Image: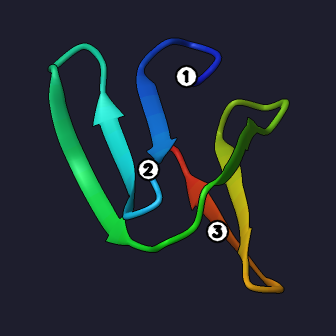
Amino acid sequence: MSPDGELFLGLTGKELIVWEVGAHQVISTIKTDLIGNIQFAQNQKSFWVMGSNLGTLVGWTVLVS
């Protein structure tokens, strides 16, 4: 959950899901077999997601408008 409670992200092992809490809808999905952790930046304008599978480390940085 984002610090302001507007976005929820989940890594399911099949995809990264971005859910808009207020609208109760999925904003986007990214296909991935990763399961990992989500951390939001202190300025609440970005967050990064990191996961690993079979020795490969993958990270995303997503800007929040």
Residue drawn 60% across the image and 57% down it: 35
Q: Quadrant of residue 23?
A: top left
* Mark whose residue sits in front, 2 or 3: 2
Residue drawn 69% across the image and 30% down it: 44
The image shows residue 56 at horizontal and vertical percentages of 77, 87
For label 2, the residue is 12
The image shows residue 4 at horizontal and vertical percentages of 56, 13
Residue drawn 57% across the image and 67% down it: 34
Q: Nearer the viewer, residue 23 or 16?
A: 16
Amino acid at circle 1: Met
44 with respect to 31 (left or right): right
Amino acid at circle 3: Trp
For label 3, the residue is 60
> Residue 1 has which mark?
1
Amino acid at circle 2: Thr
The residue carrying pointer 1 sits among few (fewer than 14), some (14 to 19) or many (20 or more) residues within 10 Å by Cα, namely: some
Label tally: 3
Give the vertical position of 6 relative to 53 (above or below).
above
Q: Secondary structure at mark 2?
A: loop
Is residue 65 something one can see in this rendering?
A: no
Q: Alpha-carbon distance for marks 2 and 3?
A: 15 Å
Q: Nearer the viewer, residue 62 or 59?
A: 59
Of labels 2 and 1, earlier in sequence is 1
3 with respect to 26 (left or right): right
Q: Quadrant of residue 16?
A: bottom left
- Please identify the quadrant where the N terminus is shown: top right
Of labels 2 and 3, earlier in sequence is 2
The image shows residue 8 at horizontal and vertical percentages of 44, 29
Q: Secondary structure at mark 1?
A: loop
> Residue 35 has which mark?
none
Q: Alpha-carbon distance for marks 2 and 1?
A: 15 Å
